[in-house]
Amino acid sequence: MPQSIRIGTATARAGETAWGEIPVPDRVARQLRPPLVAVVNGTASGPTVYVGAGAHGDEFNAMEAVRRAVLRLRPEGVRGTVVFVPLQNRAAFEIPDCLAAILDRSEQAEPLASAVDSS
């Protein structure tokens, strides 16, 4: 039986999913909120797997896929632990210039958003 796993402020006991934040240095924390982390701790011992997205800040599909994976993964079906960080680089995500090119093409993204919502 696995023990509790703590990553940042998220602590998951065996058979639990926990959300938390990864602490960052004070000089960074004054400018940005810390990254979120989800820990899915299985009911049996096994390896630890890391799943991350958002390294470049505009990887919206990957960030959403990671978020959905956390919501769908059931700890009772996991051997070991899965650590998810859906937005690894919050600084890149919050840079307006990075988002401007995508947001200006919102009408092109609408069919994709509709297809994702219907799944």
Image: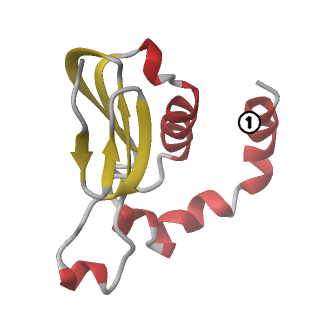
Residue placed at 31% from the left, 47% from the top? 11
Residue placed at 45% from the left, 70% from the top? 94
Q: Residue at label 1?
A: 112
**Is 107 positioned to the left or the right of 15 in the image?**
right
Question: Helix, strand, or loop for circle 1?
Answer: helix
- Residue 81 occupies quadrant: top left
Residue placed at 42% from the left, 44% from the top? 18
**Is 3 positioned to the left or the right of 87 in the image?**
left
Query: Which of these two is toward me, 58 or 82?
Result: 82
Please say whether residue 86 is visible from this viewpoint: no
Please say whether residue 66 is visible from this viewpoint: yes
Image quarter (top left, top right, bottom left or bottom right) of the N terminus: top left
**Is 64 positioned to the left or the right of 2 in the image?**
right
Total numbered circles: 1
Does 116 appear above or below 91? above
The spot of residue 68 in percent (x, y) is 57, 34
Residue placed at 20% from the left, 85% from the top? 27
Query: Mark 1, residues whose alpha carbon is within 10 Å: few (<14), some, or many (≥20)?
Result: few
The spot of residue 30 in percent (x, y) is 31, 86
Does 93 appear above or below 119? below
- Residue 13 occupies quadrant: top left
Does 59 appear above or below 73? below
Query: Which of these two is toward me, 14 or 17?
Result: 14
Report the amino acid beneath label 1: Leu
The spot of residue 31 in percent (x, y) is 34, 84
- Residue 28 occupies quadrant: bottom left
